[in-house]
Image (cartoon, helix red, strand yellow):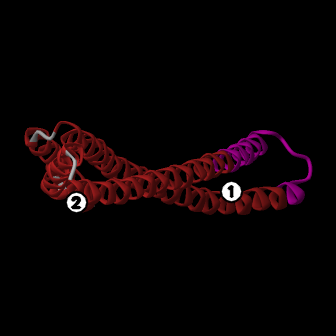
Amino acid sequence: MEPNEVQELEENAEHAEHDHAMLPVALTMTILAVLVAVVTVLGHRTHTEAILNQTKAAVEQNRVADDWAFYQAKKNRANETELTSDLMNVLAIANKDEAKKLEKGYADHQKKWEADLKDGEDKAREEEKKVVEYEKKVEEAEAKADRFDLGEALLEIGLVITSITLLTHKRAFWFVGLGFSVIGVVAATFGLLLK
């Protein structure tokens, strides 16, 4: 064997030893890459949930606005009916029978408006409760998404720092990367545990 070939074999043996020593680092990087992917998907889904609930809240707010506008229109009609009835009571009317019929009609309308106003107010209040529920769901989803985003960022940092180990062959980077990764997993777990 040539001296040149012996040296090449020795270098290959050294690389094999270094490569074998780096297997735990490579395995760690693979696991971290999978965790990053999982936490990223969880974060995206949670952000989507927040957007959907925000949209539902906006739709309900529009319904509330419509319900209150309808309520106000009925209230205006009820006030006009009451004013007309009051006006008829103070005016001198030549045909008393016709006036009594009109007064009865206005009194019937007034009762109808009162019932409609109560129903309209109840409906608007129920819609307002739905808006509050959706807004609460939005806040919850955003809090979860924040935890997932933090977990994702820390896992990515851990992955990058761990990969430096392969370049430098210094295990300190591996341990620092693992530290960031553990904190990232904890943050993502908090996101899962939030309700």
Query: How many C-alpha atoms fall within 10 Å of the one at disc 2: few (<14), some, or many (≥20)?
Result: few
Q: Which of marks 2 and 1 is nearer the N terminus?
A: 2
Q: Mark 1 points at which residue?
A: 110
Q: In this view, does 87 lie above or below 16?
A: above
The residue sitting at 35% across, 49% down in the picture is: 145
Q: In which quarter of the image is the C terminus?
A: bottom left
Helix, strand or loop: magenta stretch:
helix
Examine the image and state in which quarter residue 123 appears: bottom right
The CA distance from mark 2 to mark 1 is 79 Å
The residue sitting at 66% across, 45% down in the picture is: 69
Q: What residue type is labelled 1?
A: Gln
The residue sitting at 28% across, 58% down in the picture is: 30
Q: What residue type is labelled 2?
A: Leu
Q: What stretch is highlighted in magenta?
A: 71-99
Indicate left or right for 172 with 191 as reference: left
Regarding residue 189, the answer to whether it shows in the image is: yes
Judging depth in this view, the residue of 78 and 139 nearest the camera is 139
* Disc ID at residue 80: none
Examine the image and state in which quarter residue 169 appears: top left
Q: Is mark 2 on a helix, strand or loop?
A: helix
Q: Mark 2 points at which residue?
A: 27
Q: Residue 27 in the image: state x and y as whole percent.
A: 22, 60
Q: Residue 172 in the image: state x and y as whole percent.
A: 8, 39
Judging depth in this view, the residue of 101 and 46 nearest the camera is 46
Q: Residue 25 in the image: state x and y as whole percent.
A: 18, 53
